[in-house]
Amino acid sequence: MNRNSFLRSCLHALLVSSFCLFILTGCQSTLDDLSSSGSIPKESTPNNDSQPHTGSPDNEEKGKTFTAKIVRVVDGDTVKIKLANGNEETVRLLLIDTPETVHPSKPVQPFGPEASKFTKNLMPAGSTVEVETGIGERDKYGRLLAYFYVDGKMVNKLLLEKGLARVAYVYAPNTKYLAELESIQKQAQKERIGIWSIEDYATSKGFDDSKTDEASKEESFDATGCSKPKIKGNINSKGNKIYHLPSGQYYEITKPEEMFCTEQDAQDAGFRKSQR
């Protein structure tokens, strides 16, 4: 190969290389432009914003609710309601516990009557309430577990605010509003109102009657209250509500669902007197 042929070959190779480089550069530019315009989807990458937010339970929205009629308030934290289909249910307010007033084996506890009266005033018989059931809908006694709302306010919270209940019976997964309820309880404890006005009365295990004297107990009962209800209220296999007096034939063998201080209390609750 002579000198001129060699030079022509080199020049030709240089031109071909330059042309290829130009083409490749233009293609890459075009790809970049298309990618930035969204015409070509980019490789997906994990995005925290696309993941479900657990958030704080306090900030959760109200769950599925329904409306119901109040049949009657049993005590501060237990209510009987009538559903839209006419069925009646006993409902236990979630995450709270009020002192006893109708327990078959316990005396009326301090601030129990106040809690019961407060709940009755909020939800009188015949009134309509909003009910938000828990995730585990029933307890071991078959009662519905729920949060109640009156005029948009949660009854469970209101009882804690007044010092008429303690946070209790905390079982997952029904802990949706737990942090907020505990915060309300701490404020009531700080102010020493209601059950928190009696030192060591409200405990993590329940209410300790031994921490208050008889005078304190008497002050906590309303005019119609009594410390030891004697009248037994029983619901028989046919669904009949019957109350039994201590002098009755079947009193000793009757297992009560509820206890009453007076016959009028029993009758107001829908029970009739035993014929024996």
Image (cartoon, rainbow, N blue to C red):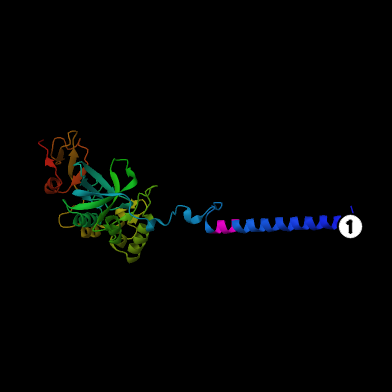
Where does the C terminus fall, quadrant-wise?
Answer: top left
**Residue at the right extreme?**
2
**Residue at the left extreme?**
275
> What is the magenta range?
31-36
Magenta region includes residue 230 = no
Give the tally of numbered discs: 1
Left or right placement of residue 24 versus residue 226 in this view: right
Relative to the observer, which residue lies in front, 53 or 34?
A: 34
Q: Which residue corresponds to the image point at 74% horizontal and 55% vertical from the top-left?
A: 16
Q: Which residue corresponds to the image point at 63% horizontal and 56% vertical from the top-left?
A: 27
User: In the image, residue 44 lies at what x, y percent?
Assistant: 54, 51
**Residue at the top extreme?**
237
Q: Can residue 228 be seen in this view?
A: no
User: In the image, residue 63 lies at what x, y percent?
Assistant: 33, 51
Left or right placement of residue 169 versus residue 226 in this view: right
Magenta region includes residue 32 = yes
Main SS category, magenta section = helix
Residue 253 picture quarter: top left
Left or right placement of residue 39 versus residue 89 in this view: right
Q: Indicate the secondary structure of the residue bearing disc 1.
A: helix
Q: Can residue 231 be seen in this view?
A: yes
Dot 1 surroundings within 10 Å: few (below 14), some, or many (20 or more)?
A: few
Relative to the observer, which residue lies in front, 160 or 68?
A: 68
Query: Please, what is the three-letter code of the amino acid marked with disc 1?
Result: Arg
**Residue wearing tag 1:** 3
User: In the image, residue 54 lies at what x, y percent?
Assistant: 44, 54
User: In the image, residue 28 lies at what x, y percent?
Assistant: 63, 57
Residue 87 picture quarter: top left
